[in-house]
Image: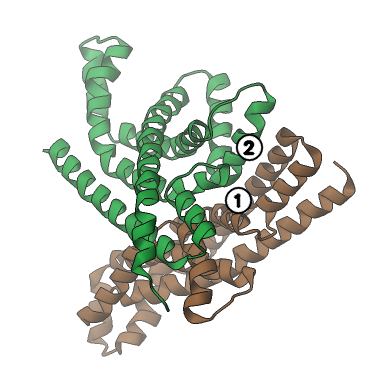
Amino acid sequence: MNWDWGAVRDFMPQFWEGLLVTLQALVLGSLISFVLGLVWTLLMRTPSRWVRWPVGVFTEFVRNTPLLVQLFFLFYVLPEWGLTFSALTTGVFAIGLHYSTYTMQVYRAGIEAVPAGQWEAATALSLPTARTWQVVILPQAIRRVVPALGNYVISMLKDTPLLMAITVLDMLGQARLFSQEHFRFTEPLTVIGVAFVLVSYLASVLLRTLERRLVR
Amino acid sequence: MTSGLWELVLTGTWTTVQLLVLSALLAAVVSFVVGIARTHRLWIVRFAAGFYTEVFRGTSALVMIFWVFFVLPPAFGWQLVPLWAGTLALGLTYGAYGSEIVRGALNSVDPAQREGGIALSFTPWQRMRLILLPQAVPEMIPPFSNLLVELLKGTALVSIMGMGDLAFSGNLVRLALQESTEIYTYVLLIYFVIAFLLTRVMRGLEHRLKAGVAR
């Protein structure tokens, strides 16, 4: 094993750029998955079978197929349909969409965990449906789902390197670029491996703090 | 699509299935070894197993694959056949997730069962084999079923290394046809069918295993 600290130093400027892209993808992807997941959950609770069935089939399909192939699909198919986005936008949307099918399950469990009495009380107060969701159900449900959502944020972090496959220069993309130019693989790959462990550790600490705040 | 292109897709599907089976076997071994080690009475064994889990769950599977393909060869002089390199990276990563399932299921067995084993002066290994595992394994099946689907989706990652799996052959066909919608729809459907079959098989297995345990 020949480890070269010089290569680590040379890699650093590219590493920071990559880290920034990775974090950007993570934050935006998480936001999309949180919002879309809630949308799916609410759609699945509508009385109409014509809404529930397609949403159910679609989300089941997205959940059970590889994110990588979905990335390729969006990256190559959307332009064929006349929609052109940057690689990062496509990638962030794909990650958000993929994980929305997971967060949807989390929300569903959270909503089902709200005691039936809360619904009944809302009915007794003759709150309109929208208001019931807004002030009674969702505030209680969201509090319960934060830990599970946090787990998916960390999963998303570990899926961001896939964006490299559609030419996004995230951490792994930069590491690959660097290794092709300097023909050194060990240093950049180890650096980003350690960075992943550190970021996911920091994220889990942050999430635990947030959890404690919310549950209090 | 011409028959030649279909053949390519089928070869890719076969590679994906092989990779899935091999890495699932490795992941199962890792899950049980590490998962059981996490309930060991020596703290150093528990610590080592916990460390393994944290490292492999903390890094991305794709980064792991890059590492096995590019860092192992010059560092240790090992050049692995792509199928084995993919198996190693996926098996070790998903095994780390599996070890948490094993640990959780072992911990969920009623403590009185363990005490019963002690009272009968079973050795720790006998307790594990005759009392704990038969009750814990059926509990592990549903989470393992999810993990297996995750692993199936993870196999697509090796296509980035140029291994001819389903995702890779999908890309080749796209280059040949210039018709992305069609080919990627087929590829996604094939993955979906495999995932569906996997969950079915696991559900059957769960029924069988639970039939043997009195509750």
Task: List x then y, in percent, for residue B66.
Answer: 51, 62
Residue A176 shown left or right of residue A216 in the figure: right
Asked if badge 2 and badge 1 are on a common chain, one would say: no
Tell which of B175 and A110 is nearer to you. B175
| Residue B150 coordinates in the image, percent (x, y) | 51, 53
Query: Could you tell me which residue is drawn at 58 percent across and 40 percent down?
Result: A70
Q: Which residue is at the far right?
A: B3
Given the image, what chain letter belongs to the residue carrying mark 2? A
Residue A198 percent location from the top left of the image: 28, 56
Q: Kindly report which numbered mark, 2 or 1, lies closer to the viewer in this rendering.
A: 2
Q: How is the image coloured?
A: by chain
Relative to A74, residue A164 above or below: below
Please report the residue visible at 23 percent of the width from the left and 44 percent of the height from the top.
A207
Asked whether residue A68 is in view, the answer is: yes
Circles 2 and 1: CB atoms closer than 8 Å: no
> Chain B's colour?
brown
Choose between A159 and B213: the one closer to the eye: A159
The CA span between labels 2 and 1 is: 19 Å
Depth order, front residue of A25/B39? A25
Q: Name the residue under label 2.
A: A73
Q: Is mark 1 on a helix, strand or loop?
A: helix
Q: In which quarter of the image is the N terminus of chain A?
A: bottom left
Q: Mark 1 points at which residue?
A: B195
Looking at the picture, tell me which residue is in the foreground, A147 or B197: A147
Q: Identify the subunit bearing mark 1.
A: B
Quarter of the view holding residue A103 = top left
Q: Quadrant of the C terminus of chain A?
A: top left
Q: Which amino acid does label 1 sit on?
A: Ala
Identify the image quadrant of residue A11: bottom left
Mark 1 Cα shell of 10 Å, populated few (<14), some (14-19), many (≥20): many
| Label 2: how many Cα within 10 Å (few below 14, some 14–19, many 20+) | many
Colour green, chain? A
